[in-house]
Amino acid sequence: MSHRARNVSVSSRVRWAERQINIVIVFISQIKYLYHSGIFRKGALMDIPQVEAFLAVGTYGGFRRAAEALRLTQPAVSARIRALEDSLSVRLFERGRPGHGLALSAAGRALRPHAEQLLQAVAQARQAVHDIRPASGGAIQIAAVLSICTYLLPDVLQRFQAAHKDVMITVRSGHSKEVLEMVLRGDAEIGLARSLHHPEVETVSLRDDPLVLVGRAASWPARSRRARLEEIADRPLIFFDRGSSDWTLTQGLFRRAGLVPNVALEVETIETAKRMVERGMGLAFLPHLAVGRELRRRSLTAIEIVDAEPIARSLDVIHPRPRPLSPAARALLQALRSALSEAGGPPRRRR
């Protein structure tokens, strides 16, 4: 790199760092304004753990499950909620319908969107401060569900490593719950899973990734690629990964309709199920991410169920709220977005 180019690069990074500092200053000014404007009674300023506890109780409908999610004792969560209510001089929760636990009061419902914005602002402020540090190679630890490891990461990581040769990448796989636990423990900087939400993590949805009913294209003429769920239940079906979220969602589709699926085969992996379908051994509900190439090549075809809603899911990136993403992790996130944008999403459902 020439001396002039190096100077331009340094100047650009300095200007960018100054913008990040301004973001932090604006955020701090907003918090100071709220404090001095008297919004918080008796000078008591709500703190971040109180807000996290409030959102957790609102999400889970009770102190016990919120405490488990936050990995705190139930009295600790109760104390945070009481302190927050005292600072605002309102009750944030009320008894819900029998069997439904706690519900947000009118004040709680008014507070919730602002509480979510506050946590997002805190995360952005931490990120802005973190970004001022000089970039370095470092390492990224990724936790991902097996299907994402198999069908998405190879292309993404090949592209990423070509541009970031000095970054060491570690990938660990597991079910969605295991991915969440690895991120919460700090074993992974980011997690890749489907439709995963938790009070302690930021969730960024990249695109839809529904479960698609697929069959061998040669066995399904174009005019017959629509069917009722009852017809599908009678055909040989291939299920995979018993106990996983995909298995549960597929079973639930039939259970809600009062149908018992004709499960001809149960296998361990998506790839095995896909190969069985290609050989005409049955139909399977598989992630669109896993069958996009076969659908484009027309070795498999998607079959629309006309009397049931699609099994909708999103492909998500998660990372802990308190810990800013490293520059390398943010570059990886951008590579994921680019790869998914180029691959194209699932087709829209016909009406």
Image (cartoon, rainbow, N blue to C red):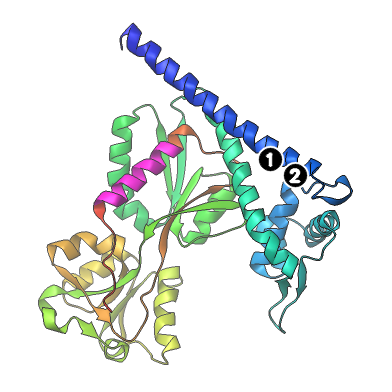
Residue under the image location 77 percent in, 73 percent down? 94
SS assignment at label 2? helix
Q: Which residue is mark 2?
A: 34
Query: Does residue 71 show up?
Result: no
Q: Is 214 or 13 nearer to us in this picture?
A: 13
Residue 55: percent from left, percent from top = 67, 59
Q: Is residue 272 left or right of residue 309?
A: left
* Quarter occupied by residue 4: top left
Q: Is residue 65 left or right of residue 174?
A: right
On residue 39, the disc is none
Amino acid type for the residue under numbered disc 2: Leu
The magenta stretch is: 330-342
- Give the distance between the C-alpha atoms of the residues marked 2 and 1, in whole angstroms: 6 Å
* Quarter occupied by residue 54: bottom right
Q: Residues within 10 Å of mark 1 (few under 14, many from 20)?
A: few
On residue 30, the disc is 1
Where is 234 relative to 168, above or below? below
Residue 106: percent from left, percent from top = 73, 69
Please identify the dominant SS of the magenta region: helix
Residue under the image location 20 percent in, 59 percent down? 293
Where is 67 relative to 34, above or below? below
| Residue 332 forms part of the magenta stretch | yes
Q: Are marks 2 and 1 in contact (CB under 8 Å)?
A: yes
Residue under the image location 53 percent in, 28 percent down? 19
Q: Outermost residue toward the front?
A: 37
Residue 242: percent from left, percent from top = 42, 72
* Quarter occupied by residue 291: bottom left
Amino acid type for the residue under numbered disc 1: Gln
SS assignment at label 1? helix
Q: Residues within 10 Å of mark 2 (few under 14, many from 20)?
A: few
